[in-house]
Image (cartoon, grey):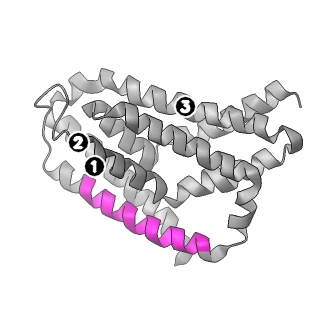
Amino acid sequence: MSSTAIFASGFGIAFGLIVAIGAQSAFVLRQAIMRNHIVPVVLVCAFSDMLFMSIGIAGFGSIVENAPWLITGMRLFGGAFLVYYGFLALRRAMKPSAMATETGPARKSLLPVLGATLAVTYLNPHFYLDTVVLLGSIANSHGDAKWVFGFGAMLASIVWFTLLGFGARFLQPLFEKPRSWQFLDGVIAIIMFTIAVNVLSPLV
């Protein structure tokens, strides 16, 4: 397989994993619609993906696969966080608010937003399973060309979060209505609860 084909494979597989709306993407979408520090949010998400893809490609994925206790701990903490975040979204959905200003409802300062971004990224076990274990394993199957695959996967992350973060602003007029926020937060709550069930179900 040529380097171009391997690069394209890395891009396509990673893009397919990331585009499936998960906890991280749902969080970014909400911040983007509110125009709530979206540049640092996008940078944190993309950099986190790139960092842990690199760790997986470097061979750490095999260590994680052989440490079931680590996976169990990740599932417990991650599942609990996702349930908590789902309840927050559900509570917002029950008390929706329209955009009062250009920046959206309840705009927060930078540090709390960055803290929430880090939490929704690093407390989600699927983040590690996708970046470190899955993509890392697939990349290593390409031998000496593993970093070519990895660079394609990293580009997919950059492209997705850039599109999500800066494209969502076009939805802002729609979210001047409280009902739109109610729908979005309801969907986010469903996503969080569904992922939490998937994360915790192997432990039952």
- Using the numbered discs, state the Cα–Cα distance from disc 1 to disc 2 in whole angstroms: 6 Å
Residue 80 sits inside the magenta stretch: yes
Segment tinted magenta in the rendering: 70-89
* Residue for badge 1: 112
Indicate which label's residue lies in the foreground, 2 or 3. 2
Indicate which label's residue lies in the foreground, 1 or 3. 1
- Write the residue at 66% across / 37% down: 153
Q: How many marks?
A: 3
Query: Which quadrant of the figure has residue 145?
Result: top right
* Residue for badge 2: 109
Q: Report crowding for label 3: few under 14, some 14 to 19, many 20 or more residues within 10 A (C-alpha).
A: some
**Rendering coords of residue 176 (x, y %):** 16, 28
* Residue for badge 3: 158
Query: Which quadrant of the figure has residue 9?
Result: top right
Query: Which is more N-terminal, label 3 or label 2?
Result: 2
- Local secondary structure at mark 1: helix
**Rendering coords of residue 95 (x, y %):** 12, 49
Task: Decide: is 132 above or below 182.
Answer: below
